[in-house]
Image: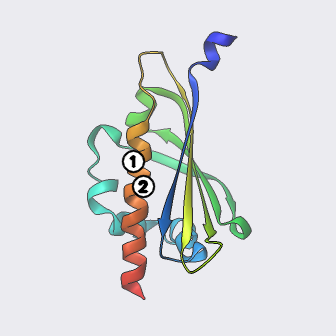
Amino acid sequence: MAEASSLVGKLETEVEIKASAKKFHHMFTERPHHVSKATPDKIHGYGKLTVGKNMIEAVDPEKNLITFKVLEGDLMNEYKSFAFTLQVTPKQEGSGSIAHWHLEYEKISEEVAHPETLLQFCVEISKEIDEHLLAEE
């Protein structure tokens, strides 16, 4: 049993954004087609890190939380399961928000690296979406 658990992992990161928590969350839940417009080089051209087909597994509008489960694509060549959770919370002081990304996954083998590059991907798309939202105002 201990052997299987070494294949299961979690990574987390936080990104400070200027947009409101509600607006940032809304971008993923109500305007997903705008995500690729806001991040054209990331979503379409990430090469080996192509996420592929995913589905929204859970949405909690009150907590500005959304979970995506990856169904198919390049990631599934190396992982049995992969899910991204994004929760956006307003900053305690001042304006802006914190985008908290939580990645949960199970690798198919020990040879597969932990997906730190995907964590960086989350940081980059958060910043680009933030800029997109601010430009719309």
In the displayed structure, 95 sits above or below 4; it is below
- Which residue is rendered at x = 57% and y = 66% of the image? 29
Label 2, secondary structure: give it: helix
- Which residue is rendered at x = 61% and y = 71% of the image? 91
Q: How many marks?
A: 2
In the displayed structure, 76 sits above or below 39; it is above
In the displayed structure, 123 sits above or below 36; it is above
- Which residue is rendered at x = 41% and y = 16% of the image? 111
The residue type indicated by label 1 comes to Gln
Please identify the quadrant where the N terminus is shown. Answer: top right
Disc 1 residue crowd, few under 14, some 14–19, many 20+, Cα 10 Å: few
Asked if disc 2 and disc 1 are in contact, CB closer than 8 Å, the reply is yes
The mark found on residue 120 in the picture is 1
The mark found on residue 123 in the picture is 2
Q: In this view of the protein, which residue sits in the foreground, 47 or 113?
A: 113
Q: Pinpoint residue 122: horizontal percent, then vertical percent.
A: 44, 52
Q: Quadrant of residue 37?
A: bottom left
- Which residue is rendered at x = 62% and y = 72% of the image? 90
Disc 2 residue crowd, few under 14, some 14–19, many 20+, Cα 10 Å: some
Q: Is residue 34 left or right of residue 67?
A: left
Q: Pinpoint residue 77: horizontal percent, then vertical percent.
A: 41, 27
Q: Pinpoint residue 15: horizontal percent, then vertical percent.
A: 49, 60
Q: Is residue 45 left or right of residue 134?
A: left
The mark found on residue 14 in the picture is none
Label 1, secondary structure: give it: helix
Taking the view exactly as shown, the residue that stands out farthest to the bottom is: 137
Q: Quadrant of residue 88?
A: bottom right
Question: What separation in Å lies between label 2 and label 1 (alpha carbons)?
Answer: 5 Å
Q: How is the image coloured?
A: rainbow
Q: Pinpoint residue 54: horizontal percent, then vertical percent.
A: 51, 47
The residue type indicated by label 2 comes to Val
